[in-house]
Image (cartoon, grey):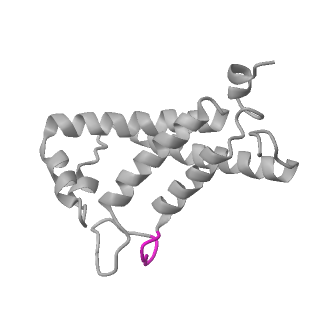
Amino acid sequence: MMKDTDFSKWQLWSLVILRVAIGWHFLYEGIVKLLNPNWSSLGYLMDSKGLFAGVFHSIAGNPALLNVMDFINMWGLILIGAGLIVGLFSRIASIAGIVLLAFYYLSHPAIIGVNFAMPTEGSYLWVNKNLIELLTLWVIMLFPTSKILGMDRFLFNKK
């Protein structure tokens, strides 16, 4: 059975680079939202299509709930990103990132014939950037590197 530390140098560094890159993406997106006093997820939620659009429209229609969701989204992105970059609680950060990306995917699913008000990078069928990043976080969760190269090394190293 493979232990958490049984990686070749190429595997380890590839996974660490992937973890840090996704962490940067999350952290940057959170900071941009934090620094913009006018940012709100209202437009994104109202643009939701697909099976769960009603849920996202309900969140957007409730100002108190919208404020809570904006706070969770903004600070979730920042904390997940920071955790992935420095390798601190990276398994928890990966799971939280997966959940957040699942909500993004369900809000804006990659379905033929669905046009969103917000522009996309291309035409998608089932697979879009949110799903790809979600699956990549799944890999990072399954093959943790933070116990070797990260702050988790100091927290969870039993030696």
Relative to residue 148, is residue 41 drawn left or right? left
Can residue 151 be seen from the camera position used here?
Answer: no
Residue 71 % position (x, y): 32, 34
Highlighted magenta segment, given as a residue range:
121-127
Q: Residue at the front extreme?
A: 1
Residue 115 % position (x, y): 28, 75
Relative to residue 10, is residue 40 drawn left or right? left
Which quadrant does the C terminus fall into?
A: top right
Q: What's the residue at 15%, 38% (across, down)? A: 63
Q: How many marks?
A: 0
Residue 106 % position (x, y): 33, 59
Image: 117 above or below 34? below
Can residue 142 be seen from the camera position used here?
Answer: yes
Relative to residue 100, is residue 44 drawn left or right? left
Relative to residue 134, is residue 146 drawn left or right? right
Q: Residue at the right extreme?
A: 9
What secondary structure is the stretch in magenta mostly built from? loop
Q: What's the residue at 68%, 46% (across, down)? A: 143
